[in-house]
Image (cartoon, coloured by chain):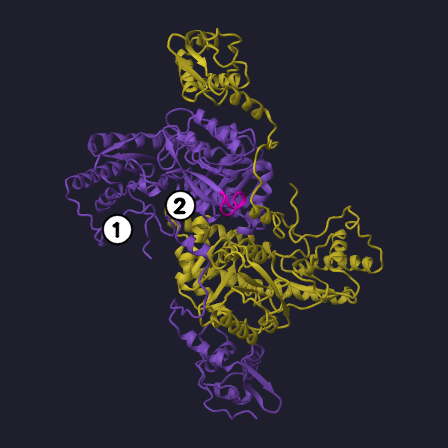
Chain colours: A purple, B yellow
Amino acid sequence: MAKRPAGIPVTLPLDARSGATLQRQVYDGLRAAILAGRLRPGTRLPSTRSLAADLAVARNTVTAAFGQLVAEGYAEARVGAGTVVARALPDDLTKVAARLALDNGGTPVRNRPRISRRGRSLSAARACCDLPTLRPFQPGWPALDQVPLDLWWRLAMRVGRRLGRELLGHGDPAGYPPLRKAIAEYVAVSRGVRCADVQIVVTSGSQQALYVAAQVLLDPDDVAWVEDPAYPGTVNALRAAGARLVPIPVDAEGIDVRFAEARRPAPRVVAVTPSHQYPLGVTMTLARRLELLRLARRARAWVLEDDYDSEFRYSSRPIPALQGLDQDGRVIYLGTFSKTLFPALRLGYAVVPADLVRPFTAARSVLDVHSPVLEQAVLAEFITAGYFERHLRRMRTLYAERQQVLLEEARRHLAGLLELAPSGAGLQCVGWLAPGLDDRTAARAAAAHDVDVTPVSRFALRRLSRPGVLLSFGAFEPRQIRAGVQRLADALRDLRNGRFADEVTAGRGPEPTPHRKAASA
Amino acid sequence: MAKRPAGIPVTLPLDARSGATLQRQVYDGLRAAILAGRLRPGTRLPSTRSLAADLAVARNTVTAAFGQLVAEGYAEARVGAGTVVARALPDDLTKVAARLALDNGGTPVRNRPRISRRGRSLSAARACCDLPTLRPFQPGWPALDQVPLDLWWRLAMRVGRRLGRELLGHGDPAGYPPLRKAIAEYVAVSRGVRCADVQIVVTSGSQQALYVAAQVLLDPDDVAWVEDPAYPGTVNALRAAGARLVPIPVDAEGIDVRFAEARRPAPRVVAVTPSHQYPLGVTMTLARRLELLRLARRARAWVLEDDYDSEFRYSSRPIPALQGLDQDGRVIYLGTFSKTLFPALRLGYAVVPADLVRPFTAARSVLDVHSPVLEQAVLAEFITAGYFERHLRRMRTLYAERQQVLLEEARRHLAGLLELAPSGAGLQCVGWLAPGLDDRTAARAAAAHDVDVTPVSRFALRRLSRPGVLLSFGAFEPRQIRAGVQRLADALRDLRNGRFADEVTAGRGPEPTPHRKAASA
C-alpha cells in the first residue's frame, strides 16, 4: 500500500515567462523533489486532477509530466494507488541530489583507478598544454599580420557557394582529393619530392603526421634515432609510440651519420629535419643526405623527413628533399602549413610510399576520421589559384629583411654577449652565448626584461657543449626587433655583471621563458 | 687532373617564357645532365665565360648557377681546373636518375622493415578508409540539405572580421575558450551534465575523444567492456590502446549489467551508448544507468559515455546522462556535432573530471596540438546566438516525420519480410528479418537493388541471436524513403523466393554493402 501524500510540492515554481513548457516545469519540479528526498520512495503523488487544480494548469499537462516520470523510472503507476515515487534505487537517487548540488567543476573523485601509464607519460610530454605568447623572440610564429585574411574569406565563400553540401559529408580520411593533388604538385616543383597524388595523406598539422608515422612504423622498444638537440614534437610522438630514443649529435652538415653508424642496435626509424635543423638551424648537405640514406638502407630503417621551414630559404635554392633522393621508398616526408600560412589552420601532410597509404589512412580513421573538409577545400583553392606561391614569395622577402634587421641590431648591441649565427632558412636563428653565460639563466634574465629567448639546452637530450638561445624573427616588425634586442642586451649585461638575481632558482618569480607559455587559465 | 669537357650540354633547354629564372634553368639543365650520367664525375664543366656565350646569357647567370651546384655538392671548384662534376657519391647520384625517371606512384621498395604490429592492426580496423555513399538507408548521415549553410558562412565572415588575426595563432589544446563555455552550457541544460567550462575538451569529432580516452585510461591488456553489438569506432579506439575487449550483451534496457557483473577480471573501462545504443537503438533506462554506475564503482572502473544521438529524441524527454548521475567523477562524457550539424565539421567534445583535463589535453597536444580555431569560433557563435538550438528543434521535427514515413512504408510493403522497430531517438532504426533470412545476404540483395541496409551482425563481437539490418532515415526525403522501401521489398522478396543468387559468395559482384563504401579512387 502506497504511503499517503505528505509534503507534496504543490508549490512548484511555475513560471509562465520561462522558456520551458509548463509540462516540463511540472516534471522538473517533481523530479527535483524526488531527488532531494522531499518526495520519499513509495510516496503517492496527488491525483492529476487535484495537482492540476493546485497548480492552475491543464490536467493534460500534469498527466504528461507524470507519464514522463514513470517512463524514466522516477515514479511507478500502481493500479488502484495512482502514481507513486519509485521504490527502486532510492539510495542512488537521493545521492544524486548531493551530486547535483555540487559546485560546477568540483568533481568529487572516489573509487577510481589511476589513469594509464601512457596517460601519465603523455602528461609529462615536452612543451605541451601551454599557450605561447606573441612577443619577441618567441619561436613558432609566422607573420600573422601578413596572412591575406580577406582573400582567404573570399575564397571560403566562393568555394562554399560552388561546392556547398558536397563539403559537408564524410570526407576521405586521406584528405580532400583536390588538396592532395595541389600538395603533390607543390612538393614536386618546390622540393623535388617524387610522388603521385595518392601518396599524399593530409594531416592535422605535421604533429599529427609525426604521431601517425610513429604509430605505424614503431613498436614499443624499437629504436628511433633523433637529432640532438631535437624538435620536442618529434620526441613526444616517438615516445608516445614507446620507442627507445637514441640521440645523435648534429654537426655543421646535419645529423652526424658517422657517429651514428657505430651505434647498436640499428634504428628502425631515423627522424631528421634536413632543411633547417630544429633548433640549431643547420641545413643538411647533399653529401650528408646521401650518406644518411645509405646508412638507412644498411640498417633497413625508415627515414622520417620533417621538412619544416624548407619554404623560406635565403642563401641558395633549396637542396632537394631526402624523399626525392630515396631509391627504396623508405622516406616519409612531412610538411605543414602552420608556418607558411598560420598555425590555427592545423593542416599538414605526409608524403608516404604507396604501400603505406593504407596503414596511414587506417590510423587516421581510428584517430579522428579526417581533417575538416571546408578548410581543406579553401586551402586547395588557395594553392591552385597561385595565391600560396605568391604569399611564399612575399614572405621570403619579408623574413629575409627581418633577419637582416635582427642580425644588424645584434651586431651593434649584443657584441660580446651573444653571437648570432645567420640562418640560411626559416624563421629563427641561434645566438651563441658568451663564455660563462648559461642559456636557461639567460632566458630567465631576458624574460625579466620582457623578451623571450628559448634556451637551446631545452631541446637537448644529452648535455650540449655550447650554451645558446633561439631567436625567432619572422613574426616581428623591425621596430619590435630593435626594441627586443635592446632589452635583451640589457638583460645579458645585467647577467654578466652579476646584477640579475636568478629568483627562479630561489623558487620565486619571475616566470621562466617556456617554449610555449602558460595561458591565463 | 680533371677530364676535359666532353658532351657538354651547351644546348640546355632555356626558355625565356618559362616562369623559372635563367639561372635556375641553367642549374636545372646541368643538374639533370649530372644525374643522368651525361656529365660524368670528375668532368670539367666549360668556363663560365664560354658557357654564357654558348647559351647567350649573362656570365653572372652561369656563375651563380655553378655556385649553387658547388654549394649543393653536385660540383666542386678546383683551383686551376675550374669547376668539375663532383667525384664524391657518383653511384648514389646516378641511381637517383633512375629514381627520378620512375613513374609517379610506382615507388620501389627495398631493404625496408615491415610496418609495426600496431600499424598492421590499425590497417585491419573496422570500417575504415572507405567513403560512405549517400543513398537510402546508409547510416551516419544527417540531413545535409537542411544545414543552414548561408548562415554558417555569414557567421564565419562576421567572426572572422571581428576576431581576425586572433584566430590565426596557436590555440588552446583544450579548445577555443568561448566554444568550451558554449558546450558546457549546452550539455548542462540539454543533457543534465554537470561541469565547469574547464572540464570541456574540444576534440576533432567524438572519434578522437574515444581515441584519447582509450589512450589515457587504458594500458595494454587492461580489460574494457563493450556493448555487443558495438559501434566500430569504439572498438577500434579501444583496440588501438591494446585493451582486451569483453563483449557484454544488450537487452531491452541497455547493456546487461547483471550478466556483466559475474565477469572476471573486472573492467577498467566500460564503454556505453546510453541514449541510443549503437546499433540496436535501445535507450538505457534510469534503473540500468544507476546499476551500471554502482557496478563501475565496485569495479573501480571508468565509464565512457558516448551520448551520440541524444539530441534527437522523439518519445519523451531524454533521460539524464550518466555523467549527471555519477557521484565519483568516473564518467567521461562524449558528444559530437557530426550528426547535429555535419560530419565534415570534425568537432566534438569530451566532458572529463577536472583532474583528467591535463592528461587529455597533453595527449591532444602530442596527437595533433588542437582543432582548427576558425571553425571552433564559428561554431561557438552558432551556439551562443541560439542558432544551434533552433536547428536542433527543426531537425527533431523533420527526423520524426521521416521516421514516420519509413515506419508506415515498411508496414505497408515489408510486412512478413522485415519488422521495423520504431526508434525513440536518433537517425536510424533496426529492422528484424523474417525467419530464414540472413542479414549479410539481405544486405547484398538490397545492394543489388540500389538500396543500403547495414547488417547488424557486422557490429557483433559474438554471434547474434537474431538477424537484423540498420536503416537510417535522417538524410532522405520522403520520396527517397518510399522508393528505397519499394526496392528493399523487391530485394527481400527475391531473396525469400530464392531468386537472389548471392554472387558475392561465389566471388563475383555485386558489391556487398559496407558501412562506409569505397570511394571511386
Residue A173, image x, y percentages: 57, 46
**Residue at the image point whose x is 24% and y is 46% from the top:** A444
The amino acid at mark 1 is Glu
Residue B234, image x, y percentages: 57, 58
Q: What's drawn in magenta, residue-wise?
A: A214-222
The amino acid at mark 2 is Leu
Q: Residues within 10 Å of mark 2 (few under 14, many from 20)?
A: many
Subunit of mark 2?
B
Residue A187, image x, y percentages: 50, 32
Label 2 sits on residue: B168
Element assignment for label 1: loop
Is the Cβ of the residue at disc 2 closer than 8 Å to that at disc 1?
A: no
**Residue at the image point whose x is 25% and y is 29% from the top:** A408
- Residue A34 visible (yes or no): yes
Q: Of residues B464 and B491, which is closer to you in this image?
A: B464
| Quadrant assignment, res B48 | top left
Task: Using the numbered discs, state the Cα–Cα distance from disc 2 to disc 1 in whole angstroms.
Answer: 26 Å
Asked whether B338 falls inside the magenta stretch, the response is no
Residue B251, image x, y percentages: 64, 71
Q: Quadrant of the C terminus of chain B?
A: top right
User: Which mark identifies residue A511?
Assistant: 1
- Residue A393 visible (yes or no): no
| Quadrant assignment, res B196 | bottom left
Q: Is residue A218 left or right of residue B256?
A: left
Subunit of mark 1?
A
Image: A112 above or below A184: below
